[in-house]
Structure formats: structure tokens, C-alpha cells
């Protein structure tokens, strides 16, 4: 292969990775940034004092003193926040599942006939001592959801004992009936997201959460989910005491 | 009151200027992030993060006509951080998993070989390769964008290209 031929092939391959024009959702969210993202007051004050590009300009002693005072106030605020603590935000999305933290006590609505004992809702707390795999398709395409479901089904065949798989779809984007059938046939549960649940408005990307037997979140994946072998490996690790 | 009105007008003008500058760069930024990260979801996230970071630091940008390069630097840094973060995860996922599938110009097997070779490169090498062969930037521009000397960029590009070429077995039975 000549240099020119390789060069062409490399460029073609890179062009093939090009995702195409920017999606409308991203354009809209980018347009909202300047409206919805407040510039921190400290930053505004800092810029008002030292001016733009101050890092390459010598500042006056008075400005330096003011900057140091601001820095001290900022440090004091951070220390106060750490000492006093802060209230947890309301549970609104899969982002609330944080590795190393207990799973949020959140009830997902059942889809008729899919939950044991006819419960109307289900949460991680309802499955004591179990490994729980929560899959959120979000706004993924039907094909992507079906592919992810197949990975879960494949993994479920080799998962440790007492592993529960829960597929949670928003009412606004229900899972295709044939995929739901596959999920149920494999002994996995489906549920609906609760009212007020925000399916990641910026991307609607899928996510996967694994909680250990003690109800603590072990792994959180977004967008790129593990394949079946990797998922089984994760479950094995999560099942260890 | 007049001062307040002037301040509000200045803030509106700044917001409008930012929105206009971002709108002009958004498409290219998203595509570049997509090529570097190989995942359109991650590309969306990275681009959005870059817009937010740019907005938060916009007041420190003295020369608005340098916005494109400045924004590009923010985006590339975010992409590089994401690649590094991915490398630290306990589970590695093939970059091809969510890659666009409309590449009809190369054989599937070759594409997979290139995917694997690219995934094996370090984040710095990946970024350098994409900026040179996808974005078509000269070495000096890449050096400015990633904040390293031009010699380092040349070395990274050379190493990356050689590894990609090796992946295709380009040295076997062919002239160079």
C-alpha cells in the first residue's frame, strides 16, 4: 500500500466516524446555556476587579488585595458547605445513582403483571439481598434498546444467584412490545419511571446501574454500556461481600 | 437607573455575542468530538460541556475574533479528559460499539482493524491524529490547540500513523 493509498484510507475511515450534522436537541440546549447557566457571582466580581485576560497583565496592589479577600471568602464558603453539609437534591434522573452511595429509595411504577406479588411499585429496597441491575433506555432508539435488552438477557443466563434485572422506561418512550416480551420471557422485570422523572433532557441517553447485595450502587454506566461478558464480570465483583 | 440599564444592555449584548459565536462553531465542534470520541452521545455531552465552560469563562476572552481557537481548545481538552476517564474505568468498551455505520469507503474488516488500533492509542495520540487527518489542521495550529510544542505534535502524529498503518498490515507486500 502506498503512502497516498493509506492516507486516503485513513481519511475515509475518520470521515466515517463523523456523526453528521449537530442534532437539534444539542443546538437547542446550547442556545439555552447563556440563558440558564448563571455565571458565578465570584467570577463576575473577579472579572470586574481584575478584568479579562488579567493572567497576562500585572495587577495593582489594591486589586491584588481585593482578589485575595475574595479568595479567602470563597475558601470560607467551601469549608462551611463541607462542615454543615447540603440537602440532597430531589431524585429526578438516573444521575441520582452514584457509585459507592446507597441506592435512592425510589419507587418505580409497575407495568401490569410484571412484578411479583402484584405490587404496584418496585424499588431496590424491595429486593433485599439481591444484586439489582437497573437499565434505563432513556431516549434510545428501539433498535438500541432491543440490542441492550439482548445483552441483559445474555448476561442474566450467567449472572450470580439472586440477581434481579429491572428495565425502566419512561411513559413518553415505551419499549417496543416484542422487546418487552423478550425481557419478560427471560424473567426480567419492566417498570415505568415515576412522575417528575427527568430522562436526561440534554441527551436522553441510556444508562445502566448495578447495586450490590447491600443496596449500595456499585457501577453506573451511561451511553456506552458493558457487553454481556463484562456485565457478568461486574456482577461477580459486585456480589462479593 | 441609567447605569442599571446600561449594564443590562451590556449583558444582553454579551449574551447575544456568545450565542452567535457558539452557533457558528457548534456543528464543527460536535463533528470533531464525534470523530475523537467515536460515540455520538458522548460527542453531544462533550460539546455541551464545552459550551457551558466557554460561557462561564467568556468574560476572560479578550479577543473575540479568537473565539474559534479558544473554544476549540476547550472542546479538545474535554474530549481528551473523557478519553482518559474512559481508560480509567474498570470496563473497557470497544469504541466501535456506537460508531456511525455509514462508512462505505473501506471494507468492514479494515474498519474494525482501524477502530481497534485507534482505541489502543493514547488520548493524546488520538487527538493529534484526528486534528491532522480529519480536521486537516497544520502542525502549528494543532500545537497551539493542545498546548504542546510543534515537535511533540509531529512525534504524536508519526507514532499514531505508524500504529494505524501497522494495524492494516500496510508494510506487508506493498511499497511505501
Image (cartoon, grey):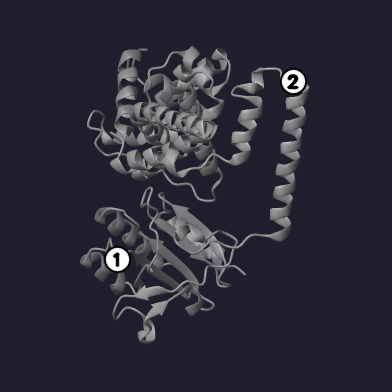
The residue positioned farthest toward the bottom in the image shown: A117
The residue positioned farthest toward the front in the image shown: B1
| Quarter of image, res A25 | top left
Residue A157 visible, this orientation: no
Subunit of label 1: A
| Residue beneath disc 1 | A171
In the rendered image, residues at marks 2 and 1 fall on the same chain: yes
Q: Picture coordinates of residue A92 (x, y %)? A: 45, 62
Of the 4 image quadrants, the one containing the C terminus of chain B is top left
Q: Residue at x 41, y 69 (%)?
A: A165
Pointer 2 or 1: first along the chain: 2
**Considering depth in this image, is B37 or A150 the residue closer to the camera?**
B37
Q: Is residue B129 above or below residue A192?
A: above
Q: Is residue A210 above or below residue A56?
A: below
Foreground disc of the pair 2, 1: 2
Q: Is residue A140 above or below residue A238?
A: above
Q: Picture coordinates of residue B154 (x, y %)? A: 51, 15
Q: Residue at x 25, y 54 (%)?
A: A143
**Considering depth in this image, is A142 or B126 the residue closer to the camera?**
A142
The mark found on residue A60 in the picture is: 2
Amino acid at each position: 500500500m502506498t503512502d497516498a493509498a493509506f492516507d486516503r484510507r485513513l481519511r475515509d475511515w475518520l470521515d466515517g466516524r463523523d456523526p453528521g450534522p449537530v442534532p437539534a436537541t444539542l443546538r437547542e440546549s446550547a442556545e439555552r446555556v447563556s440563558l440558564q447557566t448563571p455565571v458565578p457571582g465570584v467570577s463576575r466580581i473577579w472579572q470586574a476587579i481584575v478584568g479579562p485576560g488579567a493572567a497576562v497583565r500585572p495587577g495593582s496592589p489594591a486589586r491584588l488585595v481585593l482578589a485575595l479577600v475574595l479568595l479567602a471568602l470563597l475558601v470560607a464558603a467551601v469549608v462551611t458547605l463541607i462542615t454543615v453539609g447540603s440537602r440532597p437534591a430531589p431524585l429526578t434522573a438516573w444521575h441520582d445513582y452514584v457509585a459507592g452511595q446507597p441506592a435512592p429509595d425510589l419507587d418505580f411504577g409497575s407495568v401490569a403483571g410484571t412484578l411479583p406479588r402484584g405490587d404496584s411499585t418496585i424499588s431496590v429496597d424491595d429486593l433485599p439481598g439481591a444484586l439489582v441491575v437497573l437499565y434505563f433506555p432513556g431516549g434510545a432508539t428501539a433498535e438500541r434498546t432491543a440490542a441492550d435488552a439482548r445483552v441483559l438477557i445474555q448476561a442474566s443466563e450467567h449472572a450470580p444467584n439472586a440477581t434481579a434485572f429491572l428495565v425502566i422506561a419512561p411513559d413518553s418512550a415505551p419499549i417496543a412490545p416484542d422487546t418487552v416480551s423478550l425481557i419478560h420471557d427471560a424473567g426480567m422485570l419492566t417498570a415505568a419511571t415515576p412522575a417528575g422523572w427527568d430522562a436526561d433532557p440534554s441527551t436522553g441517553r441510556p444508562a445502566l446501574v448495578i447495586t450490590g447485595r447491600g443496596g449500595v450502587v456499585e457501577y453506573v454506566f451511561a451511553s456506552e454500556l458493558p457487553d454481556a461478558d463484562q456485565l457478568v464480570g461486574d456482577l461477580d465483583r459486585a456480589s462479593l461481600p | 437607573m441609567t447605569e442599571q440599564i446600561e449594564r443590562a444592555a451590556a449583558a444582553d449584548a454579551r449574551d447575544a455575542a456568545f450565542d452567535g459565536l457558539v452557533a457558528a462553531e457548534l456543528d464543527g465542534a460536535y463533528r470533531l468530538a464525534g470523530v475523537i470520541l467515536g460515540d455520538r452521545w458522548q460527542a453531544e455531552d462533550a460539546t455541551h460541556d464545552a459550551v457551558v465552560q466557554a460561557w462561564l469563562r467568556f468574560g476572560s476572552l479578550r479577543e473575540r475574533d479568537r473565539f474559534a481557537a479558544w473554544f476549540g481548545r476547550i472542546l479538545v481538552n474535554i474530549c481528551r479528559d473523557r478519553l482518559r476517564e474512559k481508560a480509567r474505568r474498570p470496563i473497557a468498551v470497544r469504541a466501535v460499539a456506537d460508531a456511525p455505520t455509514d462508512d462505505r469507503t473501506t471494507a468492514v474488516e479494515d474498519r474494525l482493524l482501524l477502530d481497534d488500533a485507534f482505541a489502543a492509542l493514547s488520548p493524546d495520540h488520538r487527538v493529534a491524529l484526528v486534528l491532522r487527518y480529519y480536521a486537516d489542521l497544520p502542525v502549528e495550529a494543532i500545537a497551539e490547540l493542545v498546548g504542546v510544542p510543534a515537535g511533540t505534535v509531529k512525534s504524536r502524529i508519526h507514532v499514531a500513523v505508524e500504529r494505524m498503518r501497522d494495524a492494516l498490515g500496510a508494510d506487508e507486500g506493498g511499497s511505501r
